[in-house]
Amino acid sequence: MRADFLILCGGLGTRLRAVTGDTPKVMADVQGEPFLDFLLRYLIKQGARRVILCAGYKAEALEEHYQQKFKEIEIHLSIEKEPLGTGGAFKNAQRLIKNDHVFGLNGDCFTPVDYQKLFAFHQEKKALGTLVAVKIDGNKDFGTIVTNEKDEVIAFKEKFQTTEIQYISAGIYCFHRSVFDRMPSEKFSIEYHFFPKMIGDRFYGFKVEAPFIDIGTPERFEWAKKHLAEMLG
């Protein structure tokens, strides 16, 4: 599986400041280690060999910590001088991409995905873009992904109250590198500004039933601290 792994690490983590202070959100302490360490170890087990950290806020903390860590993989930093949004951060890292396929991840989320199966699905569909869709019961905190019988993404729904089974984005994507040429060289959101434009153009949802961790709020972060290690096995 030859692919680069791009991880979004530039979030300010405003809602988590009461817990983490000035520490970058992805570096928030979970059982004595940064959350990002857990994520990287999982990716290494899944076959990752080249990782690009899309950094912004407190990038020097990431650079210092990962300079001498995880010798079994290449770690590169793509640093944005000003906030570029989730899409702009990916675009900013384009110059560092070496492989034809790229996994993009939100560095403050974790879902135990089989990346070999995700990659096989992406190639079988001859997809330009594939996003991981996690099954949940009910939903009021996240936008919902709608797919058809061919697994094509056909719509996104904003947050709404429901008790029905829904699929939400796990913050994990697989792209062909040509997708980056379509991205604007400016601040933009991958979820709100770019993905809707990909609908109808070889854009698929890879559905999984797995736990989903998002450490974006103090409550979710506390849950992660208790359950992350067992999720990793």
Image (cartoon, grey):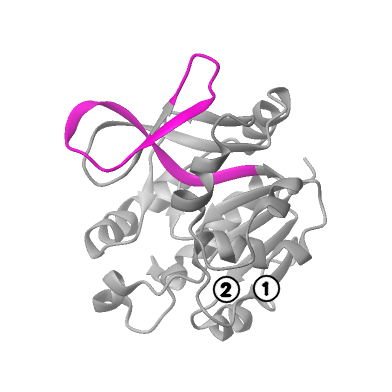
Task: Report the residue marked by disc 1.
Answer: 77
Q: Quadrant of residue 55?
A: bottom right
Of the pair 41 and 96, the residue shown nearer to us = 96
Q: Amino acid at mark 1?
A: Leu
In the image, the segment drawn in magenta is 147-174
Coordinates of residue 85 in the picture (x, y in percent): 49, 66
In the visual, does 36 lie left or right of 175? left
Residue plotted at (77% across, 59% down): 97
Task: Report the residue marked by disc 2.
Answer: 55
Q: Quadrant of residue 70?
A: bottom right
Task: Look at the image and say whether residue 160 sits in the magenta stretch.
Answer: yes
Badge 1, how many Cα within 10 Å: few under 14, some, many 20+?
many
The disc, 1 or 2, on the residue closer to the chain's N-terminal end is 2
Residue plotted at (57% across, 64% down): 88
Task: Look at the image and say whether residue 156 sits in the magenta stretch.
Answer: yes
- Circle 1 sits in a helix, a strand or a loop, which is it? strand
Q: Which quadrant, please, contains the N terminus?
A: top right
Give the dominant element type of the magenta stretch: helix, strand or loop. Answer: strand
